[in-house]
Structure formats: structure tokens, C-alpha cells
Amino acid sequence: MGDASVWGGVRVAGPIVLLLLLLPWFLPPYQTILFSYGLAFAVAALGFNLLLGYTGLLSFGHSAYFGVGAYTVAFLVKYLRIGSMELHLLGGILATAAVSALFGLVCVRYTRIFFAMLTLALSQVLWSLALKFYWVSGGTDGLRVPTPTLLGLLGGPKADKVAFLSHGYYYIVVLVFVGAVGIMWIIVHSPFGKALQAIRDNEIRAEFVGIQVRRYRWLAFLISGVFTGVAGALWAPLNGLVTPDIVYWPFSGRIVFLTVLGGFRNFTGPVVGAIVYNYLETYAVGTTTYWQFVLGAVLVVLVMTMPAGIVGTLVRLLPRIQRAA
Amino acid sequence: MTELVIQLLNSLYYASTLFLLACGLTLIYGVMRIVNLAHGTLYALGAYVTAGAVLTLGAEHPLALYLVMPIGAVAAALTGAVIEPSLLRPLYRRPEEYQLLVTFGLLLILEDVMRFLWGALPLSPSAPADHLGSITILDATYPNYNFLVIGVGALAAAALWAFVYRTKFGVILRATSQDMRMTSALGVDARRVYVLAFTIGCFLAGLGGAIIVPISGAALGMGVDALILAFVVVVVGGLGSLEGALVGSLIVGVFRTLGVNYFPEAELAILYLITAVVLLVRPTGLFGSA
């Protein structure tokens, strides 16, 4: 990567980061918290898209890693009395790394529909454990996640939750989000990322060039799982409650949905998709009992008319608009 | 001894409902290479339509009740006949993530359509099961209705086998599933085969829902839960294989019954682990071909 592209990246990313940091000062707390949800999902979508968009593997079991991240936080609070945000994130990363490394070993032996089904089956093992071992996991009632502490100073169970989430915690979410975008950008533009794309485009040719296909897929799976786990760990204190729903397979469908909504053929698509999806779902739930209908209809229309997603369609339309102007 | 017989009957009952659900899923995958995530929801639709009809009719006319029960299967079949040409046909040339997503969208839509039509509370029309009473096996009582369910499952398996292996349309169906382009070149209208296969699959799912509704009732979310079990069956038996769906249903039926009785906590986890192990050892399932 040359200096020019680094500067180009900073020129684009700088104002966005600045805007993200200023947001809590002119948005009401509720909107800030809502936006934090979107950013947390965006981290999950970035991780998911390393598999779908860059490696060409459709996982229908990413609820597993999101769930492991979130449940790790809940377990740390409940059984070890650890309330520190930094340790929550560390724990989430270690736990999802372990689980996705193991599941990945099994899953990357297959591609296409078998890969999708195997990831789904394994995620449902975790779901049924979360559901049935209720004396550990709280069953369908779930586990409460109290407000964590930041750097041992801010927050804690006694702090004003709304103020904490919209000011202190929001910055952690932004920090993790920006870090995740940066790391993922480096990954997909590294030789490793290029190798993944080569595997996606032509597995046999990639093998002949000397790429260890299965090993690279496993690494992509591991990174993807960890990103999604971090998202789960970020989400847990926001939501305040962790239930088996986030490990159930329709939640995996939701991760696929938001990634395709933004567009999985480009880097920013999943981020945009996650944020837009979060607003879409929140307002659909707020306005009608039949919000699932609204989401389902959006999904069907999206797949039929706009398969490239929001960003993909914009990228295609922009030159035309510029020419017309 | 009594317990063994009862558990065996329970396994068969369970296998029978699973087979109705799973054989449609596998038929659709076998012919058109689509994993229909809305399949469980069509099963739920069958349950709701039959439940609605039975409750409207009341418990006074036993014979009419049994005659009206297949209406759920017909409703699911009609829905399938609309879905395939309108939503799936444009997507056959696209990558499978789009096909999975469109059926996932359908699942969300149908769930809320059922919530709108029948409300959020479960329906439990037990009249058809009550009318049949129960019999005493050794020293335990067992509902007669369960025998009806086992019978319908066995009948469906036999009819499907005869249809696929002994009729001309069955030959066309199998040919299309092996090589769609070749069969088209030989003058078969593949679009018609696809609509019919999808409709038959949905009919069987709806029949599964309709037949169990007097025992388990109709509730929101039942389709989402059921799909995942059907999925276990299909993966164990082999995607696209009808024999596999039958054997898979029996295996899952037995393990589920054992699990519910002896390890209730790990009951579901065991099933998913079996699935993962089968996929690892034989990725195409017990009866599948690549």
C-alpha cells in the first residue's frame, strides 16, 4: 500500500471518526444508544463478510460466535464477579477464538451448501446448551448483564445507566468499531486477504499457485468468529440481558440479512447494512406488531431487485448520476 | 417391557411427523437444489389452517372433523404453488445465498401472516384426538390417535415411493434432478416439474402440520423449531434422498425419544452433534450422493 492510498484513507476516515466522536453531543441519549447497537452489529458484519464476501463461504451459524461473546460477558459477571469492560472484551475474544478455531476445523472441510449447513448445525448445539442447561445459563430467562466499569473508574452497577451508555460506553463502542474497521481493512488488503479472494474466485487455481486453501479458510473462519464475538461482547452490556435467542438460527439469518442489505461485494457494504438494518428493525418493531412481515418483505424485495445491496447499487449508479449532472 | 413398547410407539409417532416434514424438504432440494428455510413455516401453516377449521366446525360431527383435516395440507400446497413461480424461479441462476435469503424472508412474512390471521395465542383443537379414545397396551394407556399419525406417515412414505419410482412423472422428476439441462433438451418442461415438486413438498409439510395439530396444537414459532429438526433428518439421511429422509426420521425419532427420557438436558444437543458427526464422516449423509 503506497503513501497516497494511506492519505486517501485518512482523508475519508478522518471526518467520519470525528463525526462519530461528536455524535453524543448533539444526539439525544436514546439515539446514541441506538446507534451503538448499529456499530456493534457492524463489527459482526465485518467479521461475517470476511467469510462471505472475501472467502466465498456462506455461514448460517454466526449466531454461535455472537452468542459466545455475549454469554462470556454474562458468565464473567455472574460467576467470577468481573465487572471490568476491558476484561469482558478480552474474555470474549479468547472464548470466541477457542470456539471458532474448533468449529472452523470441522467446517472448512466443506464449501457451499454443506458449509452453510454444518455451521448451522454446530451453532444449534450451542443454542440447545444455552436453552437446556438453565441452571448455568438461566434458560429462556437469560442472564442479566449489569453496567460494567471502564478503566476501573467510570460506570459500575451503581452508575446512571443511560448517561453511562450514551457517553462513556459509546466511546468504547466507537473505539472498538474503528479498530475493527482498521484491522479488517489491513487484513483484506494484505497478501493473506488477496489469497482469500483468490480462493473465492478459483479454488483449484489458488491451490496450484501454492496457497494452502484449507488452512487459509480456517484462519479466515477464526478471524471472522472473533470479530463476531467481539460484537457480541460489546452488545451484551448495551442490551443488559443475554438470552438464547441470540444463538438461535434466525439470528444467524439476521447477520446474513444485514450484510446482504449493505452489499457483500465491497468493504463498506456490511457496515452500512448493519447500521441501516438496526434502524429498520427498531422502527419496524416500534410501529407495528407485524415487524417481521416488514423485515421479510424488505428482504424479499432486496433479493429480487437490488442483489448488490445499498452500497453495491450506489457504486453502480454514481457514475451515471455524475454523467447526467 | 411396557416401557419399551411405549417408547417404540413414541419413536414411530415422532418419526412419522418428521418424515412428512423432511421428505418435502429433501424432495425440493433434490429437484431444484434449494434449501427451503420457509419449509417449517409451511408446516405451521398447515397446522393453523386445520386447527382453525376444526375449531370452527366444533366437536359435534366427528366424521366431518376427519374429512376437514387435510385442508391444512391443501392450503400449504396452494401457497407453495404461488411461491415457486413468483419468488424462486427468478433466482435459480443466482448464488445460493440469495435463494436461502429469499426463503428466510418468506419465513418472516408467513410467521406474521399467521399471527395476523389467528392471533398470538396457541390453538389447541384436541377434538379429533379425543374422539378416538385410547387403548390399553399391557398396563399402560396409549392414545389411538397416535396410531393414525403413524399410519398416515407410513402411507405417505409408500405413496411417495410409488409416485417417484413407479410413475412416468416420477421418472421425469428423477431425470430433472440428475440433469435439468439434459431433460429440458429432451423436451421436458422443467418449469412445470419444479412447480409440481415444490407444491408436493409443501403439501407434505402441510399434511405433517395438520396431522399433529390435535396433539401438539398450533403455535407461533413451531415452524422455526420444526425446520431445524427436519434439517437434522435430511442431513443425517442425505440431502435429496427420499430413502435417507425415511431412515433419518427413524434415527432422529428414536434418539429424540431416548433423549427426552434419559438425558432431557442434552436431548437437542445430541441430535445436532449426530448431525455434525454424520457430516464429518459422510458429508453427503447416509444415502446421499454428491
Image: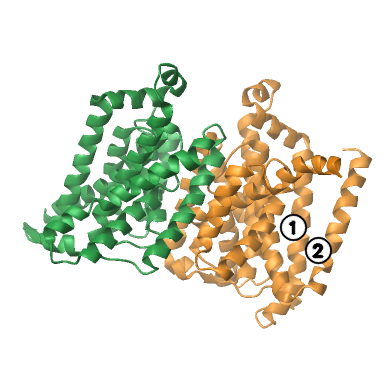
Chain colours: A orange, B green
The N terminus of chain A is located in which quarter?
top right
Q: Horizontally, is B110 left or right of B95 in the view?
A: left
Q: Secondary structure at mark 1?
A: helix
Q: Quadrant of residue B191?
A: top left
Question: Taking the image as drawn, is residue B3 in sight?
Answer: no
Question: Taking the image as drawn, is residue B137 in sight?
Answer: yes
Quick one: A117 or B205, which is closer to the camera?
Answer: B205
Q: Which mark is residue A20?
A: 2
Mark 2 residue crowding within 10 angstroms, few (<14) / some (14–19) / many (20+): some
Q: Which residue is disc 1 drawn over?
A: A177
Q: Secondary structure at mark 2?
A: helix
Q: Give the number of the mark in front: 1 or 2.
A: 2
Task: Name the residue: 39% across, 68% down.
Answer: B119
Furthest-front residue in this view: A324
The percent coordinates of residue B216 (x first, y second) are 27, 61
Q: Circle 2 marks a residue in which chain? A: A
Mark 1 residue crowding within 10 angstroms, few (<14) / some (14–19) / many (20+): many
The percent coordinates of residue A182 (x first, y second) are 79, 50
Q: Which mark is residue B143?
A: none
Distance (Cα) linking label 1 and label 2: 10 Å
Q: Circle 1 marks a residue in which chain? A: A
